[in-house]
Amino acid sequence: MARHYLGIDVGTGSARAGLFDWAGKLLATDKADIQLWREVGDIVEQSSDDIWNAVCRSVRGALEKADVAAEMVAGIGFDATCSLVVLGEGGKPLPVGPSSDPARNIIVWMDHRAAEQAKRINRTGEKVLDYVGGQISPEMETPKLLWLSENMPATFAEAWQFMDLADFLTWRATGSLARSVCTVTCKWTYLAHEDRWDAGYFRKVGLGALADEQFRRIGTEIVPGGTKLADGLTEKAASDLDLLPGTPVAAGLIDAHAGGVGTVGARGASGTVLSRMAYVFGTSACTMSTTPEPAFVPGVWGPYYSAMVPGLWLNEGGQSAAGAAIEQLIQMHPYSPEATHAAREAGQSLAGWLGRQAESRGRAAAVPKLVGELHVVPEFLGNRAPFADPDARALIAGLGMERGIDSLVGLYLAGLCGLGYGARQIVRAEQHNGIAVDTIVVSGGAAQSTLVRQILADTTGLTVAASSSPEPVLLGSAMLGAVASGDHADLRHAMQTMSTLGEVYAPQPDLADWHERRFAAFEALQGVGRSIRDGR
């Protein structure tokens, strides 16, 4: 009987499930939307019950499309955004914000309510901060926990468990409270290379209660991604998912890291696992580079031990807003309503429709003409890396009075170039600190466009490669399930067996000088923004 592996990815806007065979071939996918609440004060929340229900719908849909029986699913892997889930006794959702609605029990990764707490933590200069690029981000969990303890002490005291979303999903599936080394190392300050939490750090920043209770609410069992958890699916979870009780479930990963697993170890001639930088382009963008020894890069998160590829160190950068930044940018243009209508008529997203409009006007070679004098620094949600500046904001220069489709296409392309120049800054910072990067391997929904891939190659000056799989993030999670099932010996073996590189994009030499000048302008505009904020 054929054996298949289920990869489940929970992003910011939807839960997706994909079914793969032993060699990594995608058989079917399905998705279900999840709800997002936004409020003033940089508050963004979700519901763990809503997310679990979406996971169940997507899994059942994928199984039906693939016409695969439950007994043919040999292993399950989860990945999710690095959002904070707060549960009361027995898993009861607890409120985490001003609404006091217990259903809204998740502080989403992009929620920046804890910016002040992050600044205070950074002023302590604690040693653990060396392992988050020198500056903790409000996207991470300890600033959010500190915000809860200070602003909602009843919730903080009543909480039975604080979990990263991926760990919540594996708990909901298996009942295991084991945490993934990926989640707690990358977002909670766990020191994986020393197998410990730093109690002194928690006491210094104002979270001593967690240290006093020996960290029982944030994780006492830490395991590598792909580790089989408990006895597999519980009876209840199996019923929810239309799968068999006992089906092996793997410890999960953060969603971007699943994209890295699905790409950086792939078979292919361009680069190696030690010279490829994964670029996972979705609502946000994450970059991941692996090294045999720890590399300390100011402003780039890490180094994290075994957080993505077992036995290797990880440096994680990226942009807090990527796909979301492009969406925000193009919605500001006066032609946006008409373009949105045309995109809907064509059954496409607005960004996807604009990409096709750009391709009809000459593809990547025509970018200079279409962009003209527009310059965009798309840091709507701050700079994640390499400046670790959550207060940074977007800047646009060169706007005229144009209101038509061509100027909207130009603005869209200028925004893509801005994201590429931000990636170039991350690559430069890593290379200056001893990390060899010669190839960018892309994944994520926004990276499926050939135009986007070529612009990323042109703006960074590096080779860009794509996975041969249409769903490399889901594939990365399915690899976890394949390891938990015992069908693949370890994650490295699964990476080599189940993934291959596909199309490769080289920088266009004719555009190198133009992008060099544009990159200088990008950095100048960033500098002006910092000067304005500093009051100079």
Image (tube, rainbow, N blue to C red):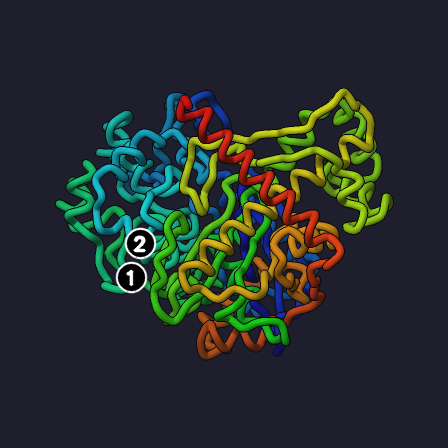
How far apart marks 1 and 2 lie (CA) works out to 10 Å
Indicate the position of residue 323 as horizontal and vertical percent values: 61, 41
Indicate the position of residue 301 as horizontal and vertical percent values: 39, 51
Q: Residue at x 54, y 73 (%)?
A: 272
Q: Residue at x 38, y 29 (%)?
A: 113
The type of residue carrying mark 2 is Tyr
Q: Residues within 10 Å of mark 1 (few under 14, many from 20)?
A: many
Q: Earlier in the sequence, mark 1 or mark 2?
A: 2
Decide if residue 263 is on the left or right side of residue 292: right
Decide if residue 270 is on the left or right side of residue 365: left
In-front residue for pair 232/81: 81
In-front residue for pair 375/283: 375
In-front residue for pair 514/376: 514
Q: Residues within 10 Å of mark 2 (few under 14, many from 20)?
A: many
Indicate the position of residue 223 as horizontal and vertical percent values: 33, 64
SS state under label 1: loop
Decide if residue 282 is on the left or right side of residue 177: right
Q: Is residue 177 above or below residue 360?
A: below
Residue of label 2: 131
Q: Which mark is residue 192?
A: 1
Q: Which mark is residue 172?
A: none
Indicate the position of residue 338 as horizontal and vertical percent values: 81, 26
Whether residue 262 is visible: yes
Decide if residue 160 is on the left or right side of residue 76: left
The type of residue carrying mark 1 is Ala
> Which image quarter holds the N terminus?
bottom right
